[in-house]
Image (cartoon, rainbow, N blue to C red):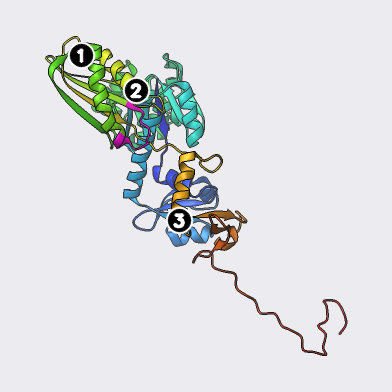
Amino acid sequence: MIACVLLTPWALHVAQRQHPGVPLAILSQGRRVSEANVLALDAGVTLSMTSVAALSRCPELHLEPLDPPALQVAWRELQETLYARYSPRVDGAVPGLAYLHATPSQARELAAALSVPVGLAPSQEVAYLAALRAQPGEVREVPADDTLFLSLTPTAHLHVLGLNASQLEKLEFLGMRGLADLLKWSAAQRQAFLGVDTSKRLQRFLKGERTTKVAAFVPSEVIEATLSVDAPLTEPGQAEAALADLMPPLLDTLRNRTCAYLTIKADTVAGILSETIPLKVGLDERGLVRAALVALERSDALLLGVDRLEVQLSGLMQPARQVGLWPDVRELDAVRAVLDRFPQGLVKVQWRDVHAYAADARYAWVDWLSGVERFTPMTPPPQQIPVAVPRSGHTVPLFGAEA
């Protein structure tokens, strides 16, 4: 099944993740509102409105300028996450619209984690239509027989099938409610109204021509090692020994990170044969060697003789660790070694009031050993407020008491 993750408009989605629960608008290069969330629209903000007019309508509105380079970086990071956690096949050519191979359980996990609509269908086009009709955090799954589902497609969603905005506007002007009304026309009528190219594309889609595969994702960072042999490898024992020589430099480059996929490429007399398999978390050197051997056997390269081996690790991620509850013995030894050499070198945070606005009221840095507070520019020492001392022979009256 192909899952369509709908995060459009992408700029608004990124801004909402950073500023949840507030009226939000995206400003274009001309300082006009290009996108706005529901809270801002309910407050009277409209698209193409200037920033001054938008703030006059909604004083608590948060304006976020459009930053294309930052949006491209965020989109690439999301694709890397989808590749590492869910599927080796991820297509994100359009920012805010991602396709990947996924199971129903993975699609539900994606929808809940990102709070976005997800469509699940045998093809990319139908999955996109399903995502448009799903609610945020919901998965709309379409079976293989999608005739009933397609007949209920509204006119506003026909841009997925190649119709442009002008054609959709004309269809709505004619009172066309969806694809079912358009199918009542003859092929000649659709061609005269939509044009030759759009009509042929729609006709091929209705006859079953769909995009049923997702292209393999190319990760930005790949760890690889190669080994050339004098005599071709034909036995599993020989291949296992060669793979054992390849793994130490790979693990040194990995540096305690995790990898999601292992790809092995073998040069044979018939060309280069490759195989990619997913990996479990926490595999050691021996486990990686066995996984690489399994991938090599699946490629059937040993039957032809292997002249050169290449192993690639991709889907790299830094695993999160909680070290505050039960630290490892090695971590304790490292802390002791640092404190012996630099007694004032380590500090830790002490929380005071997590809801306070001022930094010095929210937390304080204290010494690792003694617990004495360390003052910083963000957490300065408290100011000494002078107290008036009464002169001798006079008393200071209490509140509510007579002098």
Q: Which residue is mark 2?
A: 286
**Which residue type does callout 1 highlight?**
Ala
Q: Is 215 rendered above or below residue 115? A: above
Residue plotted at (40% across, 24% down):
280
The question of residue 286 being in magenta is answered with no
Query: Which range is magenta?
Result: 252-261
Q: Is 178 rendered above or below residue 17? A: above
Q: Which residue is mark 1?
A: 301
For marks 3 and 2, the one nearer the N-term is: 3
- Crowding at dot 1, Cα within 10 Å, few <14 / some 14-19 / many 20+, comes out as many
Q: What is the magenta segment's predominant secondary structure?
A: loop
Q: Is 329 rendered above or below residue 399? A: above
Tell me if 385 is positioned left or right of 104 in this view. right
Percent x, y for residue 70? Answer: 35, 49
Percent x, y for residue 298? Answer: 28, 13
| Residue at mark 2 to residue at mark 1: CA–CA distance | 21 Å
Q: Which residue is mark 3?
A: 63
Q: Secondary structure at mark 3?
A: strand
